[in-house]
């Protein structure tokens, strides 16, 4: 039996359809750390004791967007606190000693 030749465009279409059909089967994982759950803030936005003006503005903007998205108001405070998740090299470059903590 002779194989049926396929045009490249037909093969692409078949692959796209297969990908779309199989995509829902991919495992979906929720984040291990939640900032907000059921309309309640589970985290805070923490800035330095004497933050720069841009830091204050960024914290307020983040607070505003989180509230628009979830309805929960995440508090902005100064001081130290837990860093949730991975600590980037950029964060380490500031010279601050930080140790990541989950939860």
Image (cartoon, helix red, strand yellow):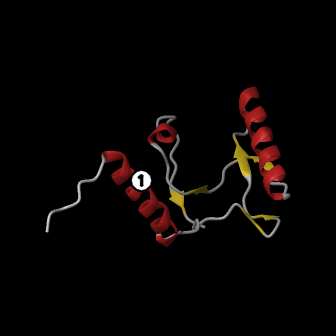
In the image, residue 75 lies at what x, y percent? 81, 52
Q: Is residue 27 above or below residue 6?
A: below
Residue shown at the point (45%, 68%) measured from the top left = 22
Residue shown at the point (45%, 60%) measured from the top left = 17
Query: Which image quarter holds the C terminus?
Result: bottom right
Q: Is residue 97 above or below residue 94?
A: below
In the image, residue 64 lies at what x, y percent? 82, 44
In the image, residue 53 lies at what x, y percent? 76, 27
Camera sees residue 81: yes
Residue shown at the point (58%, 65%) measured from the top left = 31
The residue carrying mark 1 is 13
Asked whether, in this view, residue 38 is left or right of residue 55, the answer is: right
Q: Nearer the viewer, residue 63 or 19?
A: 19
Asked whether, in this view, residue 15 is left or right of residue 73, the answer is: left
Q: Is residue 88 above or below residue 33?
A: above
Q: Nearer the viewer, residue 22 or 8?
A: 8
Query: Which image quarter holds the N terminus?
Result: bottom left
């Amino acid at each position: 039996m002779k194989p049926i030749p396929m045009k490249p465009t037909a093969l692409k279409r078949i692959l796209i359809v297969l990908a779309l059909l199989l995509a829902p089967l991919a495992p979906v994982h929720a984040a291990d750390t939640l900032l907000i759950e059921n309309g309640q803030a589970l985290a805070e936005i923490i800035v330095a004791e004497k933050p720069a003006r841009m830091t204050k503005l960024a914290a307020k903007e983040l607070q505003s967007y989180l509230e628009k998205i979830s309805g929960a108001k995440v508090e902005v405070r100064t001081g130290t606190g837990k860093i949730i998740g991975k600590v980037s090299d950029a964060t380490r470059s500031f010279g601050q000693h930080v140790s990541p903590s989950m939860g």
